[in-house]
Amino acid sequence: MQNSPKDFCQKLLGRQGEELTCKYLKKHGYRIVKRNYTTPFGEADIIANRDGTYCFVEVKARAGDGFGHPAEAVNEAKQRKYRQIAGYFCACLKEEVPIRFDVASVLDGKLEYFENAYI
């Protein structure tokens, strides 16, 4: 079954949001470690590193605010999933490293970046 035009537009919007976020991160001294990091627990949009801290970044992009602010979509279930992804990532590294969870909210092409968005 083919994806609908709506699905295509959402994927394109998501990719654009990730690109905008990566540019922001690089500009602010981060190194992009992984994009679309897939684990048995799900996928992390971006893993970046700055000053030895690994940042697990969920990117939420929307064309309008009809469904609320994009960052509001990072609910408890999504946060739990990201904690599992981070645990898997650290297990693969075979070492404990400093981590944090950030959210990139892209609304109408404008980025808001929230460091330490949740624990």
Image: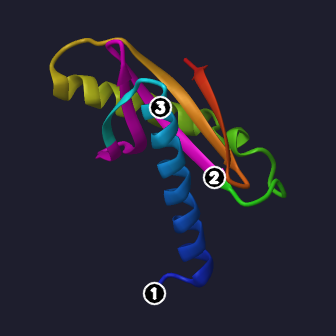
Magenta stretch: dominant SS?
Answer: strand
Q: Which residues are magenta?
A: 35-61
Q: Position of residue 19 (x, y in %)?
A: 48, 51
Q: Specify the quadrant that holds the C terminus.
A: top right
Query: Is residue 98 shown left or right of residue 20?
Result: left
The answer for how far apart the CA atoms under marks 1 and 2 are is: 23 Å
Q: Residue at x 49, y 58 (%)?
A: 15
The magenta stretch spans residue 30:
no
Q: Position of residue 4 (x, y in %)?
A: 56, 83
The answer for how far apart the CA atoms under marks 1 and 3 are is: 37 Å
Q: Please, what is the three-letter code of the amino acid marked with disc 2?
A: Ala
Q: Residue under circle 2?
A: 61
Q: Please, what is the three-letter code of the amino acid marked with disc 1?
A: Gln
Contact, mark 1 vs mark 2 (Cβ under 8 Å) = no
Q: Local crowd at mark 3 within 10 Å, few (<14), some, or many (≥20)?
A: few
Q: Residue under circle 1?
A: 2
